[in-house]
Image (cartoon, rainbow, N blue to C red):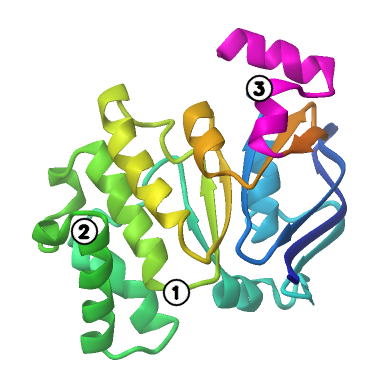
Amino acid sequence: MPNMIDIVHLNKYFGDLHVLKDVSLSVREGEKVVLIGPSGSGKSTLIRSINWLEEPSSGEVRINGELMTKKNHLEVTRKYTSMVFQQFNLYPNMTVMGNLTLAPIKLQKKTREEAEAEAMRNLKRVGLAHKADEYPQNLSGGQQQRVAIARALCTKQPIMLLDEPTSALDPEMVSEVLNVMIELAQENITMICVTHEMGFARQVADRIVFMEDGQILEEGTPEHFFTHPDNPRCQAFLDKIL
């Protein structure tokens, strides 16, 4: 199966701070990869570098074989990726339906009828069809994040990037978002997710990637990672959180 994402010798500096240190990672089409590790290890910067929300300082990112550059990164991103953020990033002055149809109409030139039909299909998938005419401020945090996932689905991109999608939620709302993500993981979508939810990682990941201090220290199947990781730092991390 071809690689959907290739990251090659990626470095990222914020001023003097070296946040990503020569990171290389390939993700196959349809693969589910979960990035875990302590806070400040570079996970979010890595996932944001894939769609050039953070421009790499050096190295390469290729999506479906296309090299991301200053000139083409917006075009490539819009063609292949959708993203779900920690903070839901919904437009407060638009209804749920307005949030879901904006990109398909403006960027993908779909008709309003097409966009609304697709939006309603995806709202049904996340259990929120009855909230189509509500404004985001009238929804709970869990509902807003489910709307954000539905919005990502509406663009029908082959890659979904999720940057700690449950970290801003109250504990009782986490499971409703994780359930939607678990269902999504059954589909032939390429998914990279940064999360601290170990149960989710164990259940859905084809591969777990452990990062610390801007580097990948360990990668493997959930069984390998949770039962006998090779790296002692990885084992120490698991001992603290499990």
In the rendered view, would you say 58 is above or below 3? above
Identity of the residue drawn at 63% across and 47% down: 206
Q: Which residues are magenta?
A: 221-242
Specify few, some or many for label 1: CA neighbours under 10 Å numbering under 14, 14-19, or 20 or more: some
Task: Out of 230 and 5, give the one closest to the viewer.
Answer: 230
Percent x, y of residue 198: 53, 27
Q: Nearer the viewer, mark 1 or mark 2?
A: 1
Identity of the residue drawn at 29% across and 74% down: 101
- Secondary structure of the residue carrying tag 1 is loop
Which of the two discs, 1 and 2, labels the residue nearer the N terminus? 2
In the figure, is residue 39 to the left or right of 82? right
- Secondary structure of the residue carrying tag 3 is loop
**Disc 1 from disc 2: Cα separation:** 24 Å
Which of the two discs, 1 and 3, labels the residue nearer the N terminus? 3
Magenta segment includes 64:
no
Residue under numbered circle 1:
156
In the image, which disc is placed on residue 93? Answer: 2
Q: Determine the image quadrant of residue 39.
A: top right
> Which three-letter amino acid code belongs to the residue tagged 2?
Asn
**Disc 1 from disc 3: Cα separation:** 32 Å
Q: Are marks 1 and 2 in contact (CB under 8 Å)?
A: no
Q: Nearer the viewer, mark 3 or mark 2?
A: 3
Specify few, some or many for label 2: CA neighbours under 10 Å numbering under 14, 14-19, or 20 or more: few
Image quarter (top left, top right, bottom left or bottom right) of the C terminus: top right
Percent x, y of residue 3: 75, 67
